[in-house]
Image (spheres, grey):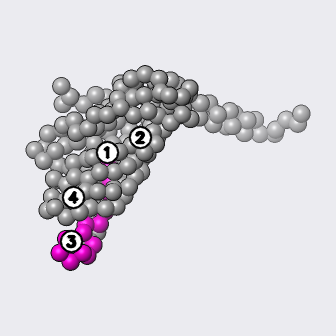
Amino acid sequence: MKRSRHPWVRLAVLAIFVLAALSTASAQSLHAKWFKVLVKADTCRVNPYTGFFSSYKFQFYIYVYLHYAGPGESPRGSLYDWEVWSKTEGGRWECVMEFSESSSSQSENFFPDINMSLPTEKGDNFSTYVTPRIVASPLSNTFVAGGEIYAGRDINGRRLYGWLTMTGKLVPMPKWVD
């Protein structure tokens, strides 16, 4: 077998495989983890009288807490209890959603098509389907998702439609949690 003149190439390839294995292979790697997530929404508001659309972009933070609830229906999937926290109109952090969701059968870190309803501090409210990819390992801790806003209303009652992105990172338990 011919040896490479550049031994760092072999090391780089090995490192890539190790990183991939660490990010997806650890069972229950998301148990008891908090993520601070920035939600960026790019929507259109529908004027109910004219039918015209106007662009409406906004962003806000949510916190997501994951708790391992047991094995999923497949060898690699896991069932997690989710808590989604958002700042509401009164300026207080509140748990706005609690649900259980199974990860993908291919990876514990991938959750296909999660339905969320999220209020904002300004009084907007919308429903979305998102597909998060969450990694919590010694080398990486990220929360990334994208989705469609299929229903919603702004504070003035105008309908919202559009899409959103979510990006976040692992954080310690917030001080305001009871």
Mark closest to the chain's N terminus, 1 or 3: 3
Mark closest to the chain's N terminus, 1 or 4: 1
Q: In this rendering, which labeled residue sits more in front, label 1 or label 2?
A: 1
- Whether residue 91 sits left or right of residue 63 in the image: it is left
The span shown in magenta is 39-53
Does residue 14 show up magenta in the picture? Answer: no
- Whether residue 103 sits left or right of residue 2 in the image: it is left
Mark closest to the chain's N terminus, 1 or 2: 1
Helix, strand or loop status at disc 4: strand
Residue 153 badge: 4
> Amino acid under label 4?
Arg
Look at 19% across and 64% down and name the residue there. Answer: 158
Give the Cα separation between the discs numbered 3 and 4. 11 Å
Give the Cα separation between the discs numbered 1 and 3. 24 Å
Residue 108 location, x and y as percent? 50, 31
Res. 96 in view: yes
Mark closest to the chain's N terminus, 2 or 3: 3
Q: In this rendering, which labeled residue sits more in front, label 2 or label 4?
A: 4
Residue 97 badge: none
Which residue occupies the extreme right position in the image? 1
The relative height of residue 172 versus residue 87 in the rendered view (above or below) is above
Give the Cα separation between the discs numbered 2 and 4. 26 Å
Residue position marked by numbered label 3 in the rendering:
47
Does residue 50 show up magenta in the picture? Answer: yes
Give the class, few, some or many, for how many residues have Cα within 10 Å of label 1's Cα (few <14, many ≥20): some
Residue position marked by numbered label 2 in the rendering:
143
Give the class, few, some or many, for how many residues have Cα within 10 Å of label 4's Cα (few <14, many ≥20): some
Residue 166 location, x and y as percent? 37, 48
Give the class, few, some or many, for how many residues have Cα within 10 Å of label 3's Cα (few <14, many ≥20): some
